[in-house]
Structure formats: C-alpha cells, structure tokens
Amino acid sequence: MIKITNGIARHPLHRMKHPINFSLDTGEHIAIVGPNGGGKSELVNTLIGKYPLLMNEVEYDFTPRTSTMAFENIRYMAFRDTYGDTAEGSYYYQQRWNSQDADIYPTVAELLPEGGNPEMRSKLYKLFGIEDLLAKTSILLSSGEMRKFHLTKALIGNPRVLILDNPFIGLDADTRIQLRLLLKELINESDLQLILVLSKTEDIPEFITHVVHVEQMTCSPKQTLEEYQKNLQAQPIYMLDKEKEKSLLDLPVRTDDMKANCIVNLHNVSIQYGSRTILKSLDWTVHNGERWALSGENGAGKSTLLSLICADNPQSYACDISLFDRKRGTGESIWEIKKHIGYVSPEMHRAYLKNLPAIDIVASGLHDTIGLYRRTLPEQQEMCRWWMNIFNIAHLAERDFLTLSSGEQRLCLLARAFVKDPQLLILDEPLHGLDNRNGQMVKDIINTFCRRPGKTLIMVSHYEEELPSCITHRLHLKKHS
C-alpha cells in the first residue's frame, strides 16, 4: 500500500535522524506512537508525499482502486484540523463568541463534500449529531464539535487509507466509544486501512495490528501490537522533579493579589445564539481555594462558560457575574481582572498562528495578549525561562512556535498560563496532544501549584484520569436541545 525504503527528505529541516524504512501492507492498521516532538508528524508528512525524498520516492499501490494518486486515496486529519483550518487567515481569538462575524463563514452543510456512500453518511451523522450542526457556521462550532465535523468530512470521502492524528482527544466518553466501534466496523466491511497517530498509548484500539514507535527523530521498525504491548514500560506515577516541586512551593506570594472570598459568582446566567440555548439560568459560585472540574458532553457550553469568566464573550456584560468579589460592569477594566487569571484553551491554541519564538509566546501571558506587542524586561524574560524550565521546554525558547510539535506548542501555552503566578487558573482541556509522561508532569505541576495558599482552579477534561488529585468540586453541564 505505502512503502518507503531508506527515505531521506530533500529539505534538511524535515529530515529524520536516520533514513525512514516503513511499510503499510494490505490488511494492516498501524498506530504511530512516541513522545511529543519525537518526529511522528514528520513521518506522516513524508508518507503522504508532503516532504519529497532525495532518491527513493514513496511507493504507492492502492489496489483494487483504479487511481494511483496519493491525494485521491489518502485522507489525513492533522492535529491542527481539529481546531479549525489554519488557512482561516481572518480568524482571531474570541471570534467564536462574536456572533455578528458568523455570516462571513460557510455553514457545516456547505463544507461537507457531496456524494459518497449514503449509508456511511447516515451513520456518521447519527454518531456525531451532525444534523444539529448542519446550519451552524464553522466558526461557531465548539472544539469538540469541530473534531466531529472533521472526522465526518474525512470519512465521507471513502478513502483507501485514513490517517487520523489523535482522533479521540476532545471527544466526550460516549462518542469516543462509538467512534472506536464505527472505525472497527468500517475496516471489517470495506477496504479502508487506518493509520492512527497517538500521543497516549492507552488510546490504541484493539483493531490496530501493528505499531511504529517514533522517538528522537528516529522511526523504529514496525512490530505487532502484541509485541509492542509486551515490551511497554510502566508509566511513572510522578514526573515532576523534586527540585522543581520545591521551587514551585517556594514561590513568593504575589503582593498585588486581590483579597476576595468569592472568586467567581454567576447568577441566573443564560446564553443564546439565535434559537440555540447554550446556558440556561445557571447559578455557580467558586470560592477562594476551591478546585473545580467542569464536565459535560461536546457542545454543552463549557468553553462558553469559561469565556464569560474571562470577559472574552461580548454577552458577559449582559449577565449577572461577579469576579473577585466585584460585580462585572461596575468600573473595573477587563485587563485589571485578566491579570489575576491564567488561561489556556483549544480556542487559544487555534489563534496562535504567528511564528514567534516560543519564549515570546510564554511572555505574551504577562500582558494577556495573543502575540507579543511589548518588549519584555530582563526580569520578565528570566521568569519566562523559569516557567519553561518547569515544563521541560527551556531548550525550545528560541525555536519558532509553528515549527514545534502540537504537544510542544501546548506546553508553551501552559507555561504562558502560569507565567504570572495567577490567583485563578482556568485550564480548558490542557492535556490535549500530550504524551503519557508530559501529561503526568502537567498534572503534577497543577497539583503542586494548587498546594499554595489562595490558588483557585477550574479545569475541563473529557478524560477522568486527566484530572489532578487536588480537585475538590465538580460541575456537570447538560446540552440543551
């Protein structure tokens, strides 16, 4: 099906450490696994022909299909696709909540390809609830709905080979189970072959036949799933270095912290877009020092709720909201509130399309901007490097953000959220795309950070095991019909 023999990319920036030897044979379904920044995306981009090779080009044989062209037989859903097309040059952070901008974007119905197998289309629409999304413009989709849309778009085209980058992240538990079952059904009933790029080894489905491990820009030989699982190393239960743990706990208390008992108070809050109700008569109070887990199915309004707290949603000023014991709209500036909040989200990851050095991405958290528009002082630079070291990315400080892997980008955005030592930490699906070790490390950092006095946490995750042990309270949102 696909074969690379001693493959070396023409462009030096896209070369692996050793020549690539890879094959996808008939009937195989492969999981490509490995740590963040290990080279998984470079391997996939070579497989699909994006990176031309020096001598031995990629060999394709899509029998029994008549077309021999890779672009007609292979569909690739990249990690970035799950947040929205990077070609959306006009996209800006907060745009999703500015409903007046929706008219300039196409609807989901307009973006889905015509034709294909009607039975397959019906199954996908039912699994992902696409009927309810058809009339929505793409800009208004939640991060979870965006994933469902891109998965539907990839599968409708009846590809011979489907490559999915972390297809299960950001989906609620029921949808993850149903997607596994659907993929299993597809490969049993058709000639479809799958390549899944996975950050977490526990996400490998049982229908995978072989595993290719990629680490330190080296593609290891293909092995059976059974062989791979037999040699799998146990995951360490604690990943934060003890010295880093101590330095976190020893951070001085901020002298400009707001003295407040009630950090967040929402009274009878309702949010509507046209005829669609997102939040209805919600009352919620978060007290100083509490650590909340926020859950709910895709499209239930979790990110919308957080956008109200962060004043990123224009409707927040029409709602009865108090932050840090101050009622919204009584004279405080947005920036006065934001400087006490550290925030990361899928929307933020999507908005960072500027190729700035990684340290500038972290520094932008000091000013609550998307991009860096002020020169950072030497002591601020030092603080940025300190936090990058905590997240094990100090060596990436001068690397351009868009050249980093999706997992490395996520660690940069996490360092950005922590860099000002905020009173309120809002983490919307913070472990997206992180490998097992980095995911555990981030959990350890969150737990350690929250051991300090006056720290409040709100965290969203669809994986129960991603939640840190410091969680004290829970709020579950239900989707309105």
Image (tube, rainbow, N blue to C red):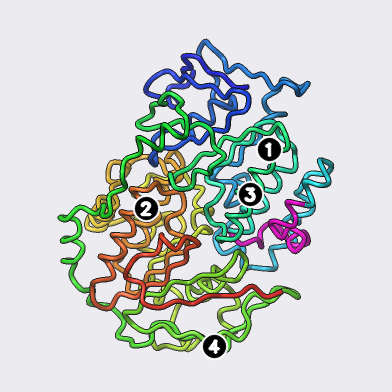
Q: Could you tell me if residue 381 is visible in this image?
A: no
The residue indicated by pointer 4 is 320
The local crowd at label 2, few if under 14, some if 14 to 19, many if 20 or more residues have their Cα within 10 Å, is many
Sooner in the amino-acid sequence: mark 3 or mark 1: 3
The residue indicated by pointer 1 is 188
Judged from the image, the secondary structure of the residue bearing numbered disc 4 is: strand
Task: Specify whether 246 is left or right of 324.
Answer: left
Task: Specify whether 350 is left or right of 38.
Answer: right
The residue indicated by pointer 2 is 439
- Of 186 and 263, the residue lying toward us: 186
Judged from the image, the secondary structure of the residue bearing numbered disc 3 is: helix
Residue at (35, 38) in percent of width and height: 232
Magenta stretch: dominant secondary structure:
helix
Q: Which residues are magenta?
A: 123-143
Alpha carbon distance from label 3 to label 2: 26 Å
The residue indicated by pointer 3 is 181
**Please, what is the three-letter code of the amino acid marked with disc 3?**
Leu
Alpha carbon distance from label 3 to label 1: 11 Å
The local crowd at label 4, few if under 14, some if 14 to 19, many if 20 or more residues have their Cα within 10 Å, is some
